[in-house]
Image (cartoon, grey):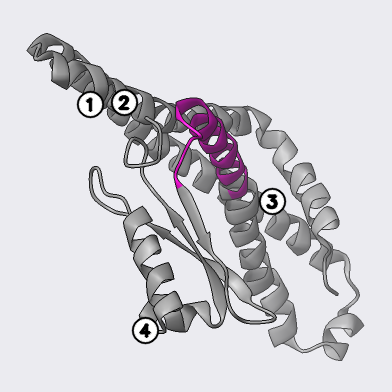
Amino acid sequence: PDVKTGEFLRLSLHYLKPYKLRQAEIFLYMLLSLAFTSAFPFVTRELFDEAIPSGEFSQVSNLLLILGGAFVVSLLAGLRQAYQSAYVSGAVVRDIRQEMFERLQLIPTEWFGRYPQGDVLARLFSDVGQVQSGLSDTIGQGIFQALSLVVSAIIMMTVSIKLGVIRLLSTADMPAEPLFFAEGGPGGSNVEEAAKIAQDLLDGNEDVYTDLLSTRDLVFFTQRGTLYAEP
């Protein structure tokens, strides 16, 4: 039978309970890994806005040392986190298979005659392997991705939320999901490109962007400190 998400999480927490100390250690390593993600935008902002323009090499070297130290800590924390996550998921699978094996010893012999051996082995190996994948992806990576999303949102709001944005509306009656564009490279901006596309649309000129506008909205973001985006 299909297992619902809530039931899967409840069963997972039951089997993870004997390894709560390792789970706490994994959570600590997640926070350490996020330290580099949190420090990077602030250090780089200080590096490009203050240290390099000042011309003082000591400021630049100190900030680079901070970035390097945070990177090493993040790397080691990620390595240890991966090891502990693999250990916990493997241990849970071992416990589940042990319980299943003990249960099989108590089942009457007639039961094995009614069910194919391949089905029993599939339950013991393939299905339990899926549980291991679920534990690794949902419990481990799921929590880390959720924390990363929260931290990234906080950083985005803290560093700067004043970005230049232009949204070109589609000519379709029922437009599909909007398509987002962000300029690459230091100091780049695509606001002028968006204005050119709008002018081409008014003039009746056809290109890739006008074709896209026939089906969906186009949203253009500029980098911080370029044209209409405040630093």
Question: Nearer the N terminus, badge 2 or badge 4?
Answer: 2
In the image, is residue 184 above or below residue 15? Answer: below
Q: Report the quarter where the C terminus lies.
A: top left
Q: Secondary structure at mark 3?
A: helix
Residue 200 picture quarter? bottom left
Q: Are marks 2 and 4 in contact (CB under 8 Å)?
A: no
Residue lying at 64% horizontally and 66% vertically, measured from the top left: 130
* Closer to the eye: label 3 or 4: 4
Q: Which residue is mark 4?
A: 205
Residue type at the position of mark 3: Asp
Residue 45: numbered disc: 2
Residue 82: numbered disc: none
Question: Nearer the N terminus, badge 3 or badge 4?
Answer: 3
Q: Secondary structure at mark 2?
A: helix
Q: Residues within 10 Å of mark 1 (few under 14, many from 20)?
A: few
Q: Left of 35 or right of it: where is 23? A: right
Q: Which residue is mark 3?
A: 95
Residue type at the position of mark 2: Arg
